[in-house]
Image: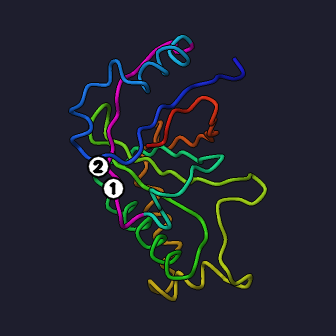
């Protein structure tokens, strides 16, 4: 088996009250039933997440969608999860304070599956990557160690990596935004 195609329906930032409303008969629901559901082999149901504010950077709900998303699903060992969060928090702080241009949102699953974290990093072109620092001489390792302590980058990376489950603990996918298969962003 070589390749597969899957659809991911995302309902953008909503209040909790939104999920109390029925969607059957709405224009968005009717569109999905007609244009998407005939191609769905299995539907797993709804997964609901909340965004963890301190682990992301440059996230703006009002910004137009990017062309691609690096979508990373992470399942952590419960006893080491704190180490992964610590590394992510430090990384986000360093990038926010040093003008990193990339975008990252980190989400925790609230309902609809086993507990997992999703890291969402949107971007427009594979050639330009996820983002950059304004200063071309910026040294991430030196800045991290200066900000968080001598040799802390390598130490935190080792502990953060060890917090990820060994089997199925990290899955990285590249998603492509297809406006022709999307309904209103509102």
Task: Choose between 148 and 41: the one closer to the eye.
Answer: 41
Task: Choose between 121 and 14: the one closer to the eye.
Answer: 14
Task: Choose between 38 and 72: the one closer to the eye.
Answer: 38
Helix, strand or loop under label 2 = helix
Percent across and percent down for residue 5 are 63, 24
Task: Choose between 182 and 134: the one closer to the eye.
Answer: 182
Percent across and percent down for residue 122 are 58, 53
What residue is shown with label 2?
A: 78
| Number of numbered tags placed on the structure image | 2
Quadrant location of the N terminus in the rendered image: top right
When asked about the image quadrant of residue 25, the answer is top left
Q: Which residue lies furthest to the right in this view?
A: 127
Q: Relative to 173, is 141 above or below?
A: below
Q: Is residue 14 magenta?
A: no
Task: Write the start and end of the magenta stretch as one range.
Answer: 39-55
Task: Tell me which residue sits at (43%, 18%) in the image.
Answer: 43
Q: Are the residues flagged by discs 1 and 2 in contact, CB closer than 8 Å? A: yes
> Mark 2: few, some, or many residues within 10 Å (few <14, many ≥20)?
few
Q: Relative to 148, is 176 above or below?
A: above
Quadrant location of the C terminus in the rendered image: top left
Percent across and percent down for residue 71 are 54, 45
Task: Tell me which residue sits at (48%, 67%) in the image.
Answer: 57
When asked about the image quadrant of residue 181, the answer is top right
Helix, strand or loop under label 1 = helix
Task: Tell me which residue sits at (44%, 63%) in the image.
Answer: 56
- In the picture provided, is 82 more to the left or to the right than 177? left
Percent across and percent down for residue 184 are 49, 37
Task: Tell me which residue sits at (59%, 65%) in the image.
Answer: 102
- In the picture provided, is 11 more to the left or to the right than 174? left
Q: How far apart are marks 1 and 2 (CA)?
A: 5 Å
| Residue 23 numbered tag | none
What residue is shown with label 1?
A: 81
């Amino acid at each position: 088996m070589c390749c597969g195609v899957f659809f991911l329906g995302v309902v953008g930032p909503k209040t909790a009250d939104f999920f109390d409303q029925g969607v059957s008969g709405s224009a968005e629901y009717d569109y999905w039933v007609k244009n998407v559901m005939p191609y769905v082999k299995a539907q797993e149901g709804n997964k609901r997440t909340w965004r963890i504010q301190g682990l992301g950077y440059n996230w703006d709900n009002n910004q137009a969608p990017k062309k691609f998303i690096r979508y990373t699903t992470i399942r952590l060992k419960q006893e080491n999860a704190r180490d992964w969060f610590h590394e992510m928090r430090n990384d986000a702080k360093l990038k926010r304070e040093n003008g990193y241009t990339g975008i990252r949102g980190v989400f925790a699953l609230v309902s609809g599956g086993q507990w997992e974290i999703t890291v969402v990093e949107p971007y427009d072109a594979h050639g330009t990557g996820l983002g950059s620092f304004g200063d071309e001489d910026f040294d991430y390792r030196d800045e991290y160690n200066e900000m968080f302590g001598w040799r802390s980058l390598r130490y935190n990376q080792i502990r953060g990596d060890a917090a990820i489950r060994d089997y199925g603990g990290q899955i990285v996918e590249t998603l492509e935004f297809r406006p022709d298969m999307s309904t209103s962003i509102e």
